[in-house]
Image (spheres, helix red, strand yellow):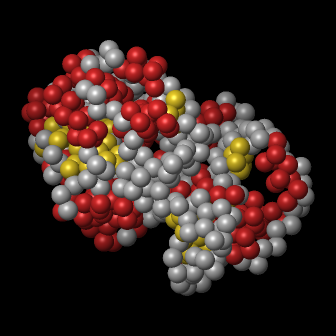
Protein backbone atom coordinates (compact mmCIF):
# COMPACT_ATOMS: atom_id res chain seq x y z
CA UNK A 1 0.00 0.00 0.00
CA UNK A 2 1.00 3.60 -0.36
CA UNK A 3 -0.63 6.58 1.28
CA UNK A 4 0.41 9.99 2.53
CA UNK A 5 2.79 9.93 5.44
CA UNK A 6 0.71 8.75 8.38
CA UNK A 7 -2.71 9.61 6.94
CA UNK A 8 -5.92 7.75 7.73
CA UNK A 9 -7.14 5.63 4.83
CA UNK A 10 -10.74 6.21 5.94
CA UNK A 11 -12.84 9.03 7.39
CA UNK A 12 -13.80 10.01 10.91
CA UNK A 13 -17.51 9.88 9.97
CA UNK A 14 -17.12 6.19 9.08
CA UNK A 15 -15.97 5.17 12.56
CA UNK A 16 -19.48 4.92 14.02
CA UNK A 17 -20.38 2.29 11.38
CA UNK A 18 -17.43 -0.02 12.04
CA UNK A 19 -18.38 -3.54 13.13
CA UNK A 20 -14.97 -4.20 14.71
CA UNK A 21 -12.26 -1.79 15.79
CA UNK A 22 -8.78 -3.12 16.49
CA UNK A 23 -7.15 -0.37 18.54
CA UNK A 24 -3.44 -0.89 19.09
CA UNK A 25 -0.94 1.49 20.68
CA UNK A 26 -3.36 4.39 20.99
CA UNK A 27 -5.51 6.09 23.63
CA UNK A 28 -8.17 8.11 21.76
CA UNK A 29 -10.23 9.23 24.76
CA UNK A 30 -7.24 11.17 26.11
CA UNK A 31 -4.89 11.86 23.19
CA UNK A 32 -7.47 12.16 20.37
CA UNK A 33 -10.79 12.92 22.10
CA UNK A 34 -12.79 13.84 18.96
CA UNK A 35 -11.95 10.49 17.39
CA UNK A 36 -12.58 8.93 20.80
CA UNK A 37 -16.13 10.32 20.78
CA UNK A 38 -16.79 8.75 17.39
CA UNK A 39 -15.48 5.44 18.70
CA UNK A 40 -17.86 5.71 21.64
CA UNK A 41 -20.69 6.10 19.11
CA UNK A 42 -19.52 2.89 17.45
CA UNK A 43 -19.43 1.18 20.83
CA UNK A 44 -23.03 2.24 21.56
CA UNK A 45 -24.07 0.83 18.16
CA UNK A 46 -22.63 -2.57 19.06
CA UNK A 47 -19.14 -2.37 17.54
CA UNK A 48 -16.75 -5.00 18.88
CA UNK A 49 -13.46 -3.63 20.27
CA UNK A 50 -10.15 -5.46 20.46
CA UNK A 51 -7.60 -3.35 22.34
CA UNK A 52 -3.87 -4.02 22.51
CA UNK A 53 -1.97 -1.70 24.85
CA UNK A 54 0.34 -1.98 27.89
CA UNK A 55 -2.08 0.33 29.75
CA UNK A 56 -5.67 -0.43 30.65
CA UNK A 57 -7.07 2.57 28.77
CA UNK A 58 -10.77 3.50 28.72
CA UNK A 59 -11.56 1.39 25.66
CA UNK A 60 -9.74 -1.60 27.18
CA UNK A 61 -12.32 -1.57 29.95
CA UNK A 62 -15.14 -1.71 27.39
CA UNK A 63 -13.53 -4.08 24.89
CA UNK A 64 -14.62 -7.61 24.09
CA UNK A 65 -10.93 -8.52 24.25
CA UNK A 66 -8.07 -6.66 25.96
CA UNK A 67 -4.50 -7.66 25.06
CA UNK A 68 -2.00 -6.16 27.56
CA UNK A 69 0.95 -6.35 25.18
CA UNK A 70 4.50 -6.00 26.52
CA UNK A 71 6.05 -2.74 25.16
CA UNK A 72 8.10 -3.41 22.06
CA UNK A 73 6.52 -6.78 21.18
CA UNK A 74 3.74 -5.63 18.80
CA UNK A 75 5.44 -7.35 15.86
CA UNK A 76 5.05 -10.73 17.54
CA UNK A 77 1.37 -10.12 18.23
CA UNK A 78 0.55 -8.96 14.69
CA UNK A 79 2.51 -11.69 12.91
CA UNK A 80 0.96 -14.35 15.15
CA UNK A 81 -2.50 -13.01 14.28
CA UNK A 82 -1.59 -13.38 10.60
CA UNK A 83 -0.45 -16.96 11.32
CA UNK A 84 -3.85 -17.75 12.84
CA UNK A 85 -5.79 -16.17 9.97
CA UNK A 86 -3.90 -18.23 7.39
CA UNK A 87 -3.78 -21.50 9.33
CA UNK A 88 -7.53 -21.34 9.99
CA UNK A 89 -8.37 -20.43 6.37
CA UNK A 90 -9.78 -17.01 7.28
CA UNK A 91 -7.77 -15.06 4.70
CA UNK A 92 -9.55 -13.26 1.82
CA UNK A 93 -8.29 -15.40 -1.05
CA UNK A 94 -9.88 -13.36 -3.81
CA UNK A 95 -8.49 -10.06 -2.50
CA UNK A 96 -5.03 -11.58 -2.10
CA UNK A 97 -5.12 -12.98 -5.64
CA UNK A 98 -6.35 -9.86 -7.40
CA UNK A 99 -4.85 -7.01 -5.37
CA UNK A 100 -1.61 -8.09 -3.68
CA UNK A 101 1.88 -9.45 -4.25
CA UNK A 102 4.39 -11.27 -2.06
CA UNK A 103 1.78 -13.43 -0.34
CA UNK A 104 3.51 -16.80 -0.67
CA UNK A 105 6.72 -15.50 0.90
CA UNK A 106 4.71 -13.91 3.71
CA UNK A 107 2.72 -17.10 4.25
CA UNK A 108 5.93 -19.14 4.54
CA UNK A 109 7.38 -16.60 6.97
CA UNK A 110 4.46 -16.58 9.45
CA UNK A 111 4.02 -20.36 9.35
CA UNK A 112 6.26 -20.82 12.39
CA UNK A 113 5.12 -17.71 14.28
CA UNK A 114 2.69 -19.53 16.51
CA UNK A 115 0.50 -17.99 19.18
CA UNK A 116 2.42 -20.00 21.79
CA UNK A 117 5.74 -18.41 20.74
CA UNK A 118 4.11 -14.98 20.55
CA UNK A 119 2.71 -15.44 24.03
CA UNK A 120 6.22 -15.78 25.45
CA UNK A 121 7.25 -12.40 23.99
CA UNK A 122 4.03 -10.44 24.36
CA UNK A 123 2.78 -11.77 27.70
CA UNK A 124 -0.66 -12.34 26.11
CA UNK A 125 -2.32 -15.78 26.41
CA UNK A 126 -2.14 -17.73 23.15
CA UNK A 127 -5.92 -18.25 23.12
CA UNK A 128 -6.50 -14.48 23.31
CA UNK A 129 -4.26 -13.95 20.28
CA UNK A 130 -6.21 -16.58 18.37
CA UNK A 131 -9.50 -14.97 19.35
CA UNK A 132 -8.29 -11.50 18.30
CA UNK A 133 -7.26 -12.81 14.89
CA UNK A 134 -10.60 -14.54 14.36
CA UNK A 135 -12.62 -11.50 15.37
CA UNK A 136 -10.67 -9.17 13.09
CA UNK A 137 -10.71 -11.51 10.08
CA UNK A 138 -14.38 -12.49 10.19
CA UNK A 139 -16.04 -9.15 10.92
CA UNK A 140 -17.91 -7.53 8.05
CA UNK A 141 -16.23 -4.16 8.59
CA UNK A 142 -12.94 -4.26 10.53
CA UNK A 143 -10.79 -1.16 10.97
CA UNK A 144 -7.38 -0.81 12.58
CA UNK A 145 -6.52 2.37 14.48
CA UNK A 146 -3.08 3.08 15.92
CA UNK A 147 -0.95 5.97 17.08
CA UNK A 148 2.44 6.57 18.67
CA UNK A 149 2.40 3.34 20.66
CA UNK A 150 3.09 1.65 17.32
CA UNK A 151 5.36 4.17 15.61
CA UNK A 152 7.59 5.42 18.45
CA UNK A 153 9.92 2.42 18.32
CA UNK A 154 13.14 1.60 16.51
CA UNK A 155 10.97 -0.87 14.57
CA UNK A 156 8.06 1.56 14.09
CA UNK A 157 7.99 1.22 10.30
CA UNK A 158 8.02 -2.56 10.65
CA UNK A 159 5.06 -2.32 13.02
CA UNK A 160 3.05 -0.22 10.55
CA UNK A 161 3.83 -2.56 7.67
CA UNK A 162 2.84 -5.54 9.79
CA UNK A 163 -0.51 -3.86 10.46
CA UNK A 164 -0.88 -3.30 6.70
CA UNK A 165 -0.21 -7.02 6.18
CA UNK A 166 -3.29 -7.83 8.27
CA UNK A 167 -5.45 -5.49 6.18
CA UNK A 168 -4.19 -7.04 2.94
CA UNK A 169 -4.64 -10.55 4.29
CA UNK A 170 -8.32 -9.97 5.11
CA UNK A 171 -9.30 -7.40 2.47
CA UNK A 172 -10.30 -4.90 5.15
CA UNK A 173 -9.03 -1.98 3.08
CA UNK A 174 -10.47 0.21 0.31
CA UNK A 175 -13.99 -0.05 1.70
CA UNK A 176 -16.27 2.00 3.96
CA UNK A 177 -15.58 1.71 7.72
CA UNK A 178 -12.42 -0.38 7.33
CA UNK A 179 -8.80 0.51 6.65
CA UNK A 180 -5.50 1.30 8.34
CA UNK A 181 -5.95 4.49 10.33
CA UNK A 182 -3.12 6.27 12.12
CA UNK A 183 -4.59 9.12 14.17
CA UNK A 184 -2.68 12.40 13.99
CA UNK A 185 -1.92 13.98 17.34
CA UNK A 186 -2.05 17.71 16.51
CA UNK A 187 -4.34 19.93 14.51
CA UNK A 188 -2.10 20.39 11.44
CA UNK A 189 0.53 17.64 11.62
CA UNK A 190 -1.03 16.14 8.49
CA UNK A 191 -0.87 19.54 6.80
CA UNK A 192 2.80 19.99 7.71
CA UNK A 193 3.86 16.75 6.01
CA UNK A 194 1.48 17.42 3.10
CA UNK A 195 3.31 20.71 2.57
CA UNK A 196 6.73 19.10 2.23
CA UNK A 197 8.10 19.21 5.78
CA UNK A 198 10.01 16.04 4.97
CA UNK A 199 13.70 15.92 3.98
CA UNK A 200 13.22 13.95 0.77
CA UNK A 201 10.01 15.38 -0.70
CA UNK A 202 8.35 18.48 -2.04
CA UNK A 203 4.75 19.22 -1.09
CA UNK A 204 2.15 16.66 -2.12
CA UNK A 205 4.64 13.82 -1.38
CA UNK A 206 6.54 14.43 -4.62
CA UNK A 207 10.00 12.92 -4.37
CA UNK A 208 13.10 15.09 -4.67
CA UNK A 209 14.75 12.14 -6.43
CA UNK A 210 12.34 12.54 -9.37
CA UNK A 211 13.98 14.89 -11.89
CA UNK A 212 10.62 15.75 -13.47
CA UNK A 213 9.34 16.95 -10.08
CA UNK A 214 12.35 19.19 -9.46
CA UNK A 215 12.23 20.51 -13.02
CA UNK A 216 8.58 21.48 -12.49
CA UNK A 217 9.34 23.43 -9.32
CA UNK A 218 12.39 25.11 -10.84
CA UNK A 219 10.29 26.34 -13.75
CA UNK A 220 7.51 27.61 -11.46
CA UNK A 221 9.86 29.40 -9.07
CA UNK A 222 12.45 30.58 -11.58
CA UNK A 223 15.45 29.26 -9.62
CA UNK A 224 17.79 26.27 -9.58
CA UNK A 225 17.05 23.94 -6.67
CA UNK A 226 19.40 21.67 -4.78
CA UNK A 227 18.69 18.01 -5.50
CA UNK A 228 20.41 16.87 -2.32
CA UNK A 229 18.12 15.23 0.20
CA UNK A 230 17.79 17.13 3.46
CA UNK A 231 18.55 15.85 6.96
CA UNK A 232 16.11 14.33 9.43
CA UNK A 233 15.81 15.78 12.92
CA UNK A 234 18.04 13.08 14.53
CA UNK A 235 20.69 13.61 11.86
CA UNK A 236 20.63 17.34 12.49
CA UNK A 237 21.16 16.88 16.23
CA UNK A 238 23.91 14.35 15.60
CA UNK A 239 25.70 16.89 13.38
CA UNK A 240 25.12 19.62 15.96
CA UNK A 241 26.74 17.52 18.67
CA UNK A 242 29.80 17.13 16.42
CA UNK A 243 29.96 20.84 15.59
CA UNK A 244 29.11 20.13 11.93
CA UNK A 245 25.77 21.94 11.92
CA UNK A 246 26.00 25.69 12.45
CA UNK A 247 22.50 27.16 12.21
CA UNK A 248 18.93 26.05 12.97
CA UNK A 249 15.53 27.64 12.33
CA UNK A 250 12.78 26.11 14.52
CA UNK A 251 9.13 26.89 13.71
CA UNK A 252 6.34 25.85 16.09
CA UNK A 253 8.35 23.06 17.68
CA UNK A 254 9.95 22.63 21.10
CA UNK A 255 12.74 20.03 20.70
CA UNK A 256 14.12 20.64 24.20
CA UNK A 257 10.89 19.13 25.50
CA UNK A 258 9.95 16.80 22.65
CA UNK A 259 13.24 15.22 21.51
CA UNK A 260 14.60 12.17 23.40
CA UNK A 261 17.61 12.38 25.72
CA UNK A 262 17.16 16.05 26.65
CA UNK A 263 20.77 16.66 27.72
CA UNK A 264 21.97 15.51 24.29
CA UNK A 265 19.47 17.87 22.61
CA UNK A 266 20.53 20.87 24.70
CA UNK A 267 24.18 20.13 24.04
CA UNK A 268 23.44 20.19 20.30
CA UNK A 269 21.65 23.54 20.52
CA UNK A 270 24.52 25.01 22.55
CA UNK A 271 26.93 23.96 19.80
CA UNK A 272 25.13 26.05 17.19
CA UNK A 273 26.46 29.38 15.99
CA UNK A 274 22.95 30.69 15.42
CA UNK A 275 19.47 29.56 16.54
CA UNK A 276 16.19 31.14 15.42
CA UNK A 277 12.91 30.13 17.06
CA UNK A 278 9.53 31.18 15.67
CA UNK A 279 6.69 30.44 18.09
CA UNK A 280 3.65 31.84 19.83
CA UNK A 281 5.13 31.48 23.36
CA UNK A 282 8.56 31.57 24.93
CA UNK A 283 9.16 27.82 24.74
CA UNK A 284 11.99 25.94 26.45
CA UNK A 285 13.82 25.86 23.10
CA UNK A 286 13.30 29.60 22.57
CA UNK A 287 15.28 30.23 25.76
CA UNK A 288 18.39 29.06 23.85
CA UNK A 289 17.68 31.17 20.75
CA UNK A 290 19.72 34.07 19.40
CA UNK A 291 16.60 35.48 17.75
CA UNK A 292 12.94 34.84 18.63
CA UNK A 293 10.32 35.64 15.99
CA UNK A 294 6.86 36.02 17.59
CA UNK A 295 4.27 34.13 15.54
CA UNK A 296 0.48 34.40 15.51
CA UNK A 297 -1.81 31.72 16.91
CA UNK A 298 -4.52 29.91 14.93
CA UNK A 299 -7.07 32.53 15.99
CA UNK A 300 -4.97 35.39 14.58
CA UNK A 301 -4.46 34.22 11.01
CA UNK A 302 -6.14 32.97 7.84
CA UNK A 303 -5.15 29.86 5.92
CA UNK A 304 -5.81 26.12 5.88
CA UNK A 305 -5.27 23.22 8.25
CA UNK A 306 -5.41 19.60 7.13
CA UNK A 307 -6.69 17.15 9.73
CA UNK A 308 -6.08 13.48 10.38
CA UNK A 309 -8.62 12.30 7.78
CA UNK A 310 -6.85 14.29 4.99
CA UNK A 311 -9.47 17.07 5.07
CA UNK A 312 -8.23 20.50 3.97
CA UNK A 313 -10.19 23.10 5.94
CA UNK A 314 -10.32 26.90 6.07
CA UNK A 315 -8.99 28.70 9.13
CA UNK A 316 -10.26 32.23 9.59
CA UNK A 317 -8.79 35.04 11.63
CA UNK A 318 -10.89 35.95 14.68
CA UNK A 319 -8.66 38.76 15.99
CA UNK A 320 -5.66 40.67 14.72
CA UNK A 321 -2.21 39.41 15.77
CA UNK A 322 -1.28 40.64 19.23
CA UNK A 323 1.74 42.88 19.76
CA UNK A 324 4.56 42.40 17.24
CA UNK A 325 3.50 38.88 16.25
CA UNK A 326 2.76 37.95 12.64
CA UNK A 327 1.36 34.89 10.83
CA UNK A 328 4.03 32.33 9.95
CA UNK A 329 3.53 32.75 6.19
CA UNK A 330 4.09 36.50 6.45
CA UNK A 331 7.28 36.09 8.52
CA UNK A 332 8.67 33.62 5.98
CA UNK A 333 7.79 35.90 3.06
CA UNK A 334 9.52 38.87 4.70
CA UNK A 335 12.62 36.80 5.42
CA UNK A 336 12.69 35.55 1.84
CA UNK A 337 12.45 39.11 0.51
CA UNK A 338 15.33 40.20 2.76
CA UNK A 339 17.41 37.24 1.54
CA UNK A 340 16.92 38.15 -2.12
CA UNK A 341 14.03 35.99 -3.35
CA UNK A 342 10.83 37.96 -3.84
CA UNK A 343 7.68 36.56 -2.24
CA UNK A 344 4.82 39.01 -2.69
CA UNK A 345 1.78 36.89 -1.88
CA UNK A 346 -1.05 39.21 -0.73
CA UNK A 347 -2.74 36.49 1.34
CA UNK A 348 -2.73 32.74 2.09
CA UNK A 349 -5.27 32.21 -0.72
CA UNK A 350 -2.68 32.94 -3.38
CA UNK A 351 -0.18 30.66 -1.61
CA UNK A 352 -2.73 27.84 -1.69
CA UNK A 353 -3.40 28.44 -5.39
CA UNK A 354 0.30 27.91 -6.08
CA UNK A 355 0.35 24.80 -3.89
CA UNK A 356 -2.60 23.30 -5.80
CA UNK A 357 -1.07 24.13 -9.18
CA UNK A 358 2.11 22.17 -8.36
CA UNK A 359 0.68 19.11 -6.57
CA UNK A 360 -1.79 16.83 -8.42
CA UNK A 361 -3.34 15.54 -5.18
CA UNK A 362 -4.52 19.08 -4.31
CA UNK A 363 -5.31 20.27 -7.84
CA UNK A 364 -9.09 20.31 -7.38
CA UNK A 365 -9.10 22.16 -4.05
CA UNK A 366 -9.50 25.93 -3.89
CA UNK A 367 -10.80 28.44 -1.34
CA UNK A 368 -14.21 28.72 -3.02
CA UNK A 369 -14.75 24.96 -2.76
CA UNK A 370 -13.79 24.81 0.92
CA UNK A 371 -15.66 27.96 1.94
CA UNK A 372 -18.13 25.96 4.03
CA UNK A 373 -16.83 22.39 4.18
CA UNK A 374 -13.36 20.98 3.79
CA UNK A 375 -12.34 18.53 1.05
CA UNK A 376 -10.33 15.34 1.52
CA UNK A 377 -7.34 14.78 -0.74
CA UNK A 378 -6.60 13.35 -3.21
CA UNK A 379 -8.77 15.69 -5.24
CA UNK A 380 -7.35 15.83 -8.79
CA UNK A 381 -9.74 18.34 -10.37
CA UNK A 382 -12.45 20.84 -9.47
CA UNK A 383 -15.25 18.43 -10.38
CA UNK A 384 -13.89 15.76 -8.01
CA UNK A 385 -15.71 15.58 -4.64
CA UNK A 386 -12.61 14.54 -2.69
CA UNK A 387 -11.73 11.06 -1.50
CA UNK A 388 -13.65 9.73 1.48
CA UNK A 389 -11.52 6.58 1.74
CA UNK A 390 -8.37 5.49 -0.06
CA UNK A 391 -7.55 2.44 -2.19
CA UNK A 392 -11.01 1.64 -3.56
CA UNK A 393 -10.39 -0.84 -6.37
CA UNK A 394 -6.63 -0.28 -6.56
CA UNK A 395 -3.58 0.88 -4.63
CA UNK A 396 -1.42 3.82 -5.66
CA UNK A 397 1.63 1.57 -6.16
CA UNK A 398 -0.33 -1.10 -8.02
CA UNK A 399 -0.63 -4.38 -6.06
CA UNK A 400 -0.51 -4.12 -2.28
CA UNK A 401 2.76 -5.56 -1.04
CA UNK A 402 3.12 -8.04 1.81
CA UNK A 403 6.26 -7.44 3.88
CA UNK A 404 8.27 -10.14 5.63
CA UNK A 405 9.22 -8.50 8.94
CA UNK A 406 11.03 -10.53 11.62
CA UNK A 407 10.95 -9.26 15.19
CA UNK A 408 13.55 -6.66 16.16
CA UNK A 409 14.09 -6.04 19.85
CA UNK A 410 14.01 -2.51 21.30
CA UNK A 411 17.30 -0.63 21.48
CA UNK A 412 17.09 -0.85 25.26
CA UNK A 413 14.80 -2.72 27.61
CA UNK A 414 14.67 -3.76 31.24
CA UNK A 415 17.68 -5.42 32.88
CA UNK A 416 18.99 -6.09 36.39
CA UNK A 417 20.16 -2.48 36.87
CA UNK A 418 17.06 -0.90 35.36
CA UNK A 419 14.37 -3.55 35.88
CA UNK A 420 11.30 -1.61 34.69
CA UNK A 421 10.18 -0.60 31.20
CA UNK A 422 9.47 3.13 30.88
CA UNK A 423 6.87 4.32 28.38
CA UNK A 424 5.65 7.89 27.78
CA UNK A 425 2.62 9.66 26.35
CA UNK A 426 -0.04 12.35 26.67
CA UNK A 427 -2.92 13.07 29.03
CA UNK A 428 -6.37 14.46 28.24
CA UNK A 429 -5.80 17.90 29.72
CA UNK A 430 -2.38 18.72 28.27
CA UNK A 431 -0.84 18.82 24.86
CA UNK A 432 2.63 17.45 24.01
CA UNK A 433 5.33 19.73 25.44
CA UNK A 434 2.74 21.71 27.45
CA UNK A 435 3.86 24.97 25.80
CA UNK A 436 0.25 26.02 25.27
CA UNK A 437 -1.93 24.03 27.69
CA UNK A 438 0.18 24.62 30.80
CA UNK A 439 -0.62 28.31 30.34
CA UNK A 440 -4.32 27.47 30.59
CA UNK A 441 -5.80 27.79 34.09
CA UNK A 442 -8.49 25.19 33.37
CA UNK A 443 -6.09 22.53 32.05
CA UNK A 444 -3.64 23.17 34.87
CA UNK A 445 -6.41 22.88 37.44
CA UNK A 446 -7.33 19.44 36.08
CA UNK A 447 -3.74 18.11 35.83
CA UNK A 448 -1.24 20.16 37.80
CA UNK A 449 1.82 17.96 38.27
CA UNK A 450 3.81 15.14 36.75
CA UNK A 451 3.03 11.59 37.83
CA UNK A 452 4.30 8.08 37.21
CA UNK A 453 1.89 5.18 36.86
CA UNK A 454 3.11 2.07 38.71
CA UNK A 455 1.51 -1.36 38.95
CA UNK A 456 0.43 -2.10 42.50
CA UNK A 457 2.61 -5.23 42.74
CA UNK A 458 5.74 -3.28 41.68
CA UNK A 459 4.84 -0.49 44.12
CA UNK A 460 4.38 -2.96 46.96
CA UNK A 461 7.76 -4.58 46.29
CA UNK A 462 9.43 -1.16 46.32
CA UNK A 463 7.52 0.09 49.37
CA UNK A 464 5.99 2.93 47.37
CA UNK A 465 2.60 4.34 48.32
CA UNK A 466 0.07 6.11 46.14
CA UNK A 467 0.61 9.88 46.13
CA UNK A 468 4.16 10.02 47.41
CA UNK A 469 7.01 11.55 45.42
CA UNK A 470 9.45 9.06 43.89
CA UNK A 471 12.63 9.24 41.83
CA UNK A 472 12.71 7.72 38.33
CA UNK A 473 16.11 7.09 36.74
CA UNK A 474 17.51 5.73 33.47
CA UNK A 475 21.01 5.70 32.02
CA UNK A 476 20.43 9.27 30.76
CA UNK A 477 19.26 11.02 33.91
CA UNK A 478 16.67 11.20 36.64
CA UNK A 479 13.48 13.09 37.56
CA UNK A 480 10.94 13.05 40.39
CA UNK A 481 7.19 12.60 40.07
CA UNK A 482 4.10 11.72 42.09
CA UNK A 483 3.34 7.99 42.24
CA UNK A 484 -0.02 6.80 40.91
CA UNK A 485 -0.41 3.20 42.05
CA UNK A 486 -3.02 1.00 40.31
CA UNK A 487 -3.41 -1.89 37.90
CA UNK A 488 -3.75 0.48 34.92
CA UNK A 489 -0.23 -0.32 33.67
CA UNK A 490 1.12 -3.78 33.08
CA UNK A 491 3.34 -5.21 35.81
CA UNK A 492 6.95 -4.31 35.09
CA UNK A 493 5.94 -1.18 33.15
CA UNK A 494 5.82 2.45 34.27
CA UNK A 495 4.25 5.32 32.35
CA UNK A 496 4.97 9.09 32.54
CA UNK A 497 3.36 11.99 30.60
CA UNK A 498 5.61 14.31 28.59
CA UNK A 499 4.12 17.72 29.45
CA UNK A 500 6.06 18.86 32.52
CA UNK A 501 9.28 20.84 32.19
CA UNK A 502 10.01 20.48 35.91
CA UNK A 503 9.92 16.69 35.51
CA UNK A 504 10.84 16.39 31.83
CA UNK A 505 10.49 12.72 30.96
CA UNK A 506 12.70 13.18 27.91
CA UNK A 507 15.63 13.55 30.26
CA UNK A 508 15.15 9.78 30.59
CA UNK A 509 14.31 8.54 27.09
CA UNK A 510 16.92 7.06 24.77
CA UNK A 511 18.01 8.67 21.50
CA UNK A 512 17.45 5.54 19.40
CA UNK A 513 15.47 5.82 16.17
CA UNK A 514 13.52 3.91 13.56
CA UNK A 515 15.84 3.11 10.67
CA UNK A 516 13.45 4.52 8.04
CA UNK A 517 11.33 7.31 9.56
CA UNK A 518 13.89 8.34 12.21
CA UNK A 519 11.10 8.41 14.81
CA UNK A 520 12.51 8.10 18.31
CA UNK A 521 11.85 5.12 20.59
CA UNK A 522 9.89 6.95 23.28
CA UNK A 523 7.91 3.87 24.29
CA UNK A 524 10.62 1.54 25.61
CA UNK A 525 13.70 2.02 27.76
CA UNK A 526 15.08 0.51 30.95
CA UNK A 527 14.25 2.42 34.15
CA UNK A 528 14.25 2.11 37.92
CA UNK A 529 12.16 3.64 40.69
CA UNK A 530 13.44 4.69 44.08
CA UNK A 531 11.54 5.67 47.16
CA UNK A 532 12.69 9.08 48.41
CA UNK A 533 13.61 8.75 52.07
Spot occupied by residue 82 in the image (x, y as percentages of width and height): 33, 29
Total count of labels:
0
Q: Nearer the viewer, residue 74 or 456?
A: 74
Q: Is residue 509 left or right of residue 38?
A: right
Q: Is residue 183 left or right of residue 117?
A: right
Q: Residue at x 56, y 49 (%)?
A: 4
Q: Is residue 396 in view from this perspective? A: yes
Q: Is residue 467 left or right of residue 303?
A: left
Spot occupied by residue 231 in the image (x, y as percentages of width and height): 68, 38
Q: Give the quarter of the image for residue 411.
A: top left
Spot occupied by residue 27 in the image (x, y as percentages of width and height): 30, 51
Q: Nearer the viewer, residue 161 or 107?
A: 107
Q: Residue at x 77, y 41 (%)?
A: 210
Q: Nearer the viewer, residue 99 or 237?
A: 99
Q: Is residue 236 left or right of residue 442?
A: right
Q: Quadrant of the C terminus?
A: top left
Spot occupied by residue 413 in the image (x, y as percentages of width and height): 34, 24
Outermost bottom residue: 319
Q: Residue at x 23, y 22 (%)?
A: 115
Q: Is residue 425 in view from this perspective? A: no
Q: Residue at x 43, y 55 (%)?
A: 10
In the image, residue 231 above or below residue 410: below
Amino acid sequence: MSFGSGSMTNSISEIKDCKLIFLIGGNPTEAHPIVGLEMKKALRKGCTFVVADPRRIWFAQHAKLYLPVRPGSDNWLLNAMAHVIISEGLENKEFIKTRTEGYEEFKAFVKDITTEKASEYTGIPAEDIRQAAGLYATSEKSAIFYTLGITEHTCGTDNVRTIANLALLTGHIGKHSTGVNPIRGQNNVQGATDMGCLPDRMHGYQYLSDSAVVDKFEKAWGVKLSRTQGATSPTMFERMSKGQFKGLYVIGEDPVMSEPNQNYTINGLNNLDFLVVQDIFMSETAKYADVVLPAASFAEKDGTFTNTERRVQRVRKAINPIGNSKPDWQIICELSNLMGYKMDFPSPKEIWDEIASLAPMFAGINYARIEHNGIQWPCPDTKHPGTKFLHEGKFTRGPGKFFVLPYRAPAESADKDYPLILSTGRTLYHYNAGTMTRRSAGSTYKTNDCFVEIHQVDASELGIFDGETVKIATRRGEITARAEVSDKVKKGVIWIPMHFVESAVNKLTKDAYDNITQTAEYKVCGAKLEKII
